Image: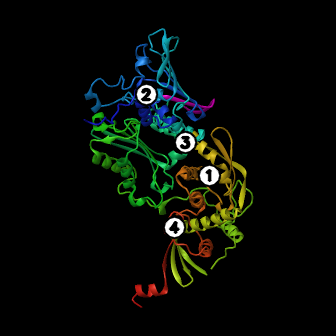
């Protein structure tokens, strides 16, 4: 006799919840799926409203073609879709939502209400579901388009619900989803409200550049170069950072393939490969790239969330991206940090305080004054001059030294900021005129969560509206800085905090960014007294060999090494 079988067919309800786990990672995933449906319906205006980070309510209203009374309930059956007619359609997908999994998966873990009407119809249809079961289906008055509400997400799956982050974190992911949709579809109006507050409003934009300005602001556009490339059926356009303006942060690194926001290792690798040795150690490019190619050249059916894609000609895509970015900077790409122009207001001349703050030492003088507070003092330096506005040549003790002025000063500032944080006694300077900063909503939420952390290192920032802030004080060591750029780099650091367990490492990344912005830039011409002061401060810190980001500070030649070079050993 055979033994009893062990394999069982799972109940439909369990299957639906498993599918929901693949598609519905968090509230932002629901928002993405609903926006995709609105876009496929030909909408010109999409309004999104959420409460409690999307956990309590997600509402999406569009002016698309709507659904008939027959189609409304069918849309919530598994693998029901209007986007595919045959198996052959899978090899050439041109729509965003096509798998027929999103709506039934969302419905299985929430309470849903849908009101939809087709444009010629006088009446629409209302459907109410709870945990995937139809509670109500009847005729209802409605304007053309679809109005869908998703309430109490994961109400029937508490194990999933407890893994959601705070409302602020979940909303930041939702904001990013709306921003990505806005970037991909500049001809469509998007708006986003959270807890009754207007957060995003993207009116119809005339071009991709205008929409990038709406989303990321003028600061981003000032740092980037336009990319444009076309070959056969492949078109690439977008924006990528100038090599001399890269930073330690990775955001944004947006990739869109046929208007889908995706993650793709091939494209990302091609971008980094294009920068090559022109990318300083510890720095990363930021970019917004749009790739368009024939649908049959791409597989978008790789993952349930449709965030990953596979290319038919992967090597061709890699080479196209690499060439396009290199071409944006000229060929050959003769760009170096030494050619970086002096930035107005980044570093004040010695003895001249900044124009809009109290009379405190700035630049090197500020660093030396703070250094004295920390007990540091100068060892013996004879300066000879400067090469290329970047490298300092001096006799330090008995050694001939060639020193990178930016990395040396950066390390000095970092060491003193670090001691200030450890002793909870960072000297600060208060701004006579607070500096205003405007941010995208997801970054505003991130900054709001870390205001107390920044205050501990001497950076006092206060909210000044839903997505606006003012800087009231900065560490004295920094002198004059470009506030918008500083805050942007700090946000890049703060966005990585959740993945860093050590508090010291979290603070180290933030202080490294502060030091980088406060340090004298490459290309800044210094006189001999300034050179002497900078090197003395570096000597006082123990002649560290690298900056906080790992870049080399100095080339040191002892008397014995010089004798060997000239054959006198």
Q: Which of marks 1 and 3 is nearer the N terminus?
A: 3
Depth-wise, is mark 1 or mark 4 nearer the camera?
A: 1
Image coordinates for residue 14, horizontal then vertical, percent: 42, 31
Front-most of 128 and 352?
128
Look at mark 1 in the image and give the residue it sits on: 483
SS at badge 3: helix
The Cα atoms of the two marked residues, 4 and 2, are separated by: 67 Å
* Residue topped by disc 3: 217
- Please tell me how crowded label 1 is: few (under 14), some (14-19), or many (20+) other residues with Cα within 10 Å: some
What residue would you read off at disc 2? Answer: 13
Which type of secondary structure does the marked residue at label 1 adopt? Answer: helix
Real-space Cα separation, disc 1 to disc 3, in angstroms: 14 Å
Q: Distance between the residues labelled 1 and 4?
A: 23 Å
Measure how far apart labels 3 and 4 are at the Cα level.
31 Å
The residue carrying pointer 4 sits among few (fewer than 14), some (14 to 19) or many (20 or more) residues within 10 Å by Cα, namely many
Give me the disc on residue 14: none
The stretch in magenta equals 187-201
Q: Which residue is labeled 4 in the image?
A: 390
Outermost residue, front direction? 1
Few, some or many residues within 10 Å of mark 2 (<14, 14–19, 20+): few
Quick check: is 198 in the magenta stretch?
Answer: yes
Q: Where is residue 161 in the image (x, y as percent from the top left)?
A: 54, 37
**In this orientation, does residue 62 appear?**
yes
Above or below, comparing residue 412 to residue 195 in the picture: below
Disc with the residue nearer the chain's start (1 vs 4):
4
Q: Which of 553 and 507 is in front in this view?
A: 507
Residue at point 27% right, 35% down?
296
The tag earlier along the polypeptide, 4 or 2, is 2
Circles 3 and 2, Cβ within 8 Å, touching? The answer is no
């Amino acid at each position: 006799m055979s033994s009893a079988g062990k394999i069982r067919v799972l109940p439909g309800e369990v299957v639906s919840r498993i599918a929901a786990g693949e598609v519905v990672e968090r509230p932002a995933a629901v928002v993405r799926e609903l926006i995709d449906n609105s876009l496929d319906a030909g909408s010109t205006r999409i309004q999104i409203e959420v409460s409690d980070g999307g956990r309590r309510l997600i509402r999406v209203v569009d002016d698309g073609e709507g659904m008939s009374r027959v189609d409304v309930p069918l849309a919530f059956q598994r693998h029901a879709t209007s986007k595919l007619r045959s198996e052959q359609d899978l090899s050439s997908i041109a729509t965003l939502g096509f798998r027929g999994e999103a709506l039934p998966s969302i419905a299985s873990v929430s309470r849903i209400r849908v009101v939809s009407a087709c444009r010629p119809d006088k009446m629409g249809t209302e459907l109410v579901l709870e945990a995937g079961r139809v509670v109500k289906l009847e005729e209802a008055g409605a304007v053309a388009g679809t109005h869908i509400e998703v309430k109490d997400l994961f109400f029937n799956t508490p194990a999933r619900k407890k893994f959601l982050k705070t409302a602020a974190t979940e909303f930041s992911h939702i904001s990013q989803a709306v921003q990505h949709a806005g970037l991909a579809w500049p001809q469509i109006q998007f708006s986003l409200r959270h807890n009754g507050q207007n957060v995003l409003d993207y009116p119809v934009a005339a071009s991709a550049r205008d929409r990038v300005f709406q989303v990321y602001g003028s600061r981003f556009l000032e740092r980037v170069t336009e990319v444009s490339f076309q070959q056969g059926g492949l078109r690439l356009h977008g924006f990528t950072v100038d090599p001399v303006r890269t930073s330690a942060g990775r955001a944004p690194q947006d990739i869109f393939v046929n208007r889908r926001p995706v993650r793709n290792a091939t494209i990302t690798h091609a971008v980094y490969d294009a920068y090559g040795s022109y990318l300083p150690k510890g720095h990363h490019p930021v970019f917004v790239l749009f790739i368009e190619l024939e649908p049959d050249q791409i597989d978008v059916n790789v993952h349930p969330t449709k965030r990953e894609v596979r290319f038919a000609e992967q090597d061709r895509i890699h080479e196209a991206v690499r060439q396009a970015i290199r071409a944006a900077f000229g060929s050959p790409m003769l760009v170096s940090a030494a050619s970086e122009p002096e930035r107005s207001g980044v570093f004040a001349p010695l003895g001249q305080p900044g124009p809009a703050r109290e009379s405190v030492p700035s630049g090197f003088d500020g660093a030396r004054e703070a250094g004295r507070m920390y007990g540091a003092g100068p060892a013996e330096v004879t300066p000879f001059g400067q090469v290329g506005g970047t490298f300092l040549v001096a006799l330090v003790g008995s050694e001939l030294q060639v020193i990178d002025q930016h990395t040396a000063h950066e390390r000095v500032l970092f060491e003193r900021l670090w001691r200030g944080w450890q002793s909870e006694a960072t000297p600060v300077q208060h701004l006579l005129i607070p500096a205003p900063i405007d941010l995208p909503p997801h970054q505003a939420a991130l900054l709001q969560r870390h205001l107390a952390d920044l205050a501990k290192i001497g950076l006092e920032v206060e909210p000044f509206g839903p997505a606006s802030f003012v800087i009231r004080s900065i560490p004295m060591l920094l002198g004059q800085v470009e506030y918008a750029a500083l805050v942007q780099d700090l946000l890049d650091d703060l966005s990585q905090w959740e993945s860093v367990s050590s508090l010291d490492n979290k603070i180290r990344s933030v202080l490294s960014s502060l030091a980088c912005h406060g340090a004298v830039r490459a290309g800044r011409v210094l006189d001999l007294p300034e050179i002497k002061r900078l090197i003395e401060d570096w000597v006082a810190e123990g002649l560290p060999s690298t900056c906080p980001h790992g870049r080399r500070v100095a080339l040191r030649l002892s008397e014995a090494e010089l004798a060997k070079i000239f054959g006198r050993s």
